[in-house]
Each structure stands twice: as C-alpha cells, then as structure tokens.
C-alpha cells in the first residue's frame, strides 16, 4: 500500500498527529506494508488511544489521496514497544532504513522472530 507517491507525506502526517497529542515524534518511517513511529509517549494518553487516533485520522486522510486508496483500512492490532533512551539512535537508524532492511527479510518473518525472542 505504501507507494512512493504518498509515503513521505503519510509519515509527516503521522508525526503531526503524534505532535498534536503531545507525543513528541522522533522519527516516522516504514516499508510498503507497515509503519514505524518512534515517539515520546505523553503521560496524558494511553498507547492504545494513541494508536486509535493515528489509525483513525490517517485512514481518513489516506482515502483522500486518490481513487486507489478509497477502500484503505489499517489492519487490526498493533505492536508497541518501549526502549531505553540510549537505544534511540539505533532505533532511528532502523526506522530510516526500512526499505533496505526488508530486501533481506519480510516484515512478517522479522516480527515473528522478534516476538519469539522477547516472549
């Protein structure tokens, strides 16, 4: 779904939603079938509510971007992880290199391995 035409604009839009909810966005990125957002979660909002707001507003926005997006919807569920502040640069690098990274491993395979490792 994430084609070059809207990808960067979507990432900026997601960052704007985070900012409006007082969740300071550090980086947004992703690949054709998923997005990553590294932000500082505000004490005023639960992660579940942040994700709901991100999905609701961005889904409506995406549908305005052309006929091919009229039936767009996000999948159910999400993955949310906390990191140590010392790892922020490593995570930013990971997010910024998603297209290269997923030439080697699919998101689905990587996510399953991640969950298995940290279960």
Image (cartoon, rainbow, N blue to C red):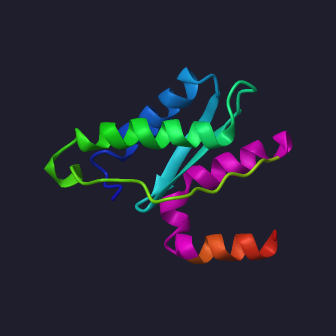
Judge left or right: residue 95 versus residue 40: left
Q: Position of residue 1 (x, y in %)?
A: 33, 59
Task: Residue 87: give x, y in percent of width and height.
Answer: 80, 47
Residue at position x 41%, y 35% from top? 57
Q: In the picture, residue 22 is in which quadrant? A: top right
Q: Viewer-proximal residue, 102 or 69?
A: 69
Left or right of 68 on screen, residue 52 = right
Q: Is residue 89 magenta?
A: yes
Residue 23 among those drawn in magenta: no
How many marks on residues? 0
- Residue found 49% across the figure and 59% down from its top: 76
Q: Single out the residue that lies furthest toward the left.
A: 67
Residue 33 position (above or below residue 56) = below
Q: Which residue corresponds to the image point at 32% horizontal and 36% vertical from the top-left?
A: 61
Q: Is residue 107 left or right of residue 85?
A: left
Segment colored magenta:
84-108
Tell me which corner region of the image, top left, top right, bottom left or bottom right, holds residue 88. Answer: top right
Q: Which residue is located at x 37 percent, y 47 percent?
A: 7
Location of residue 40 with respect to 86 vertically, above or below: above
**Image quadrant for the C terminus?**
bottom right
Kindly report the secondary structure that dominates the magenta region of the rendered protein: helix
- Toward the viewer: 77 or 28? 77
In which image quadrant can residue 117 be found?
A: bottom right
């Amino acid at each position: 779904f994430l084609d070059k035409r809207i990808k960067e604009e979507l990432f900026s839009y997601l960052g704007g939603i985070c900012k409006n909810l007082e969740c300071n966005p550090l980086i947004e990125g992703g690949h054709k079938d998923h997005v990553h957002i590294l932000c500082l979660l505000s004490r005023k909002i639960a992660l579940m509510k942040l994700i709901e707001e991100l999905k609701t507003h961005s889904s409506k926005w995406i549908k305005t971007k052309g006929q091919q997006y009229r039936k767009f919807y996000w999948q159910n569920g999400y993955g949310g992880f906390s990191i140590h502040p010392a790892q922020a640069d490593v995570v930013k690098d990971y997010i910024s290199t998603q297209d290269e990274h997923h030439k080697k491993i699919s998101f689905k395979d990587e996510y399953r391995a991640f969950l298995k490792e940290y279960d």
